Amino acid sequence: MIRVGVVTISDTRDLDTDTSGQLVVRALRRSRDIDVTGRVVVRDEVQQIKGAIDTYLQEKADCIITNGGTGISKRDVTFESIREKIHQELPGFGEIFRMLSFETIGSKAIASRAIAGFTQSDCLLFALPGSTNACDLAMEKLILPELEHLIGEKRKKADI
C-alpha cells in the first residue's frame, strides 16, 4: 500500500473549490494500492507549505503531491519551499512535464517550475501547477504510470 498526502497551495481556494486537489485524489483512488491519507489547502506561504509537508512526513507518507504555486509570480513560493525538502531530485519529471505541457499550451510551459524528488526520509514529493489541466496531465501521463515503480525502487534493500 502506498500512502499519499495531497496539498493544494492557493490563496483563493478551499477544500470545496479546490478542483485540482479533488482531481488528484480521484485519480489516486482509482488504484487499490494507493491510500490517500489526507488532503489540505494552505496559503502560498513558505511556512504553511513546509508545515503541511512536514505533517505528512511525520505521518510516514510514501508520497506527497502538491498543486499550485509553481509559477513565477511574486506569490509563487512552492518551488523554493519544496526544493529545500528534496534530497534526491528527479529532473526528468520536470523536463518531461514541461515537454508534454508544451504540446498543449505552447511556449507558456517554460514558466512552470514543476519539480519532483525524494526527501531525506525517502518520501516521493511532486510539485504540480495549480491548473486542473496540468494536474490531469501530470497524473495520467507521469505520476500514476510510475508511482508504484518509484516507491518500489526506494523500498528495495541495498545490495551490499
Image: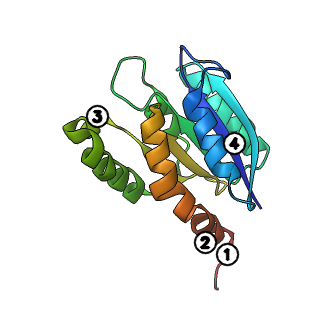
Mark in the foreground, 4 or 2: 4
Q: In this rendering, does residue 39 appear at all?
A: yes
**Which residue has dot 1 on it?**
156
Residue flagged by tag 1: what amino acid is it?
Lys
Residue occupying the point 74% across, 62% down: 33
Other residues around mark 2 within 10 Å, as few (<14) / some (14–19) / many (≥20): few
Q: Residue furthest top?
A: 12
Q: Position of residue 18 (x, y in %)?
A: 60, 25
Q: Amino acid at mark 2?
A: Glu
- Disc 4 target residue: 5
Name the amino acid type tagged 3. Answer: Ala
Q: Secondary structure at mark 2?
A: helix
**Hey, which quadrant is residue 85 in on the image?**
top right
> Residue 117 or 19: which is nearer the viewer?
19
Q: Amino acid at mark 4?
A: Gly
Of marks 3 and 1, which one's residue comes earlier in the chain?
3
Residue 70 lies left or right of residue 154; in this view the side is left
Residue 71, position in %: x, y?
Answer: 37, 29
The residue wearing badge 3 is: 111
- Residue 88 visible? The answer is no
Please tell me whether mark 4 sits on a helix, a strand or a loop.
strand
Q: Spatial distance from mark 1 to mark 2, Cα to Cα?
A: 5 Å
Give yes or no for contact between labels 1 and 2 (Cβ–Cβ under 8 Å): yes
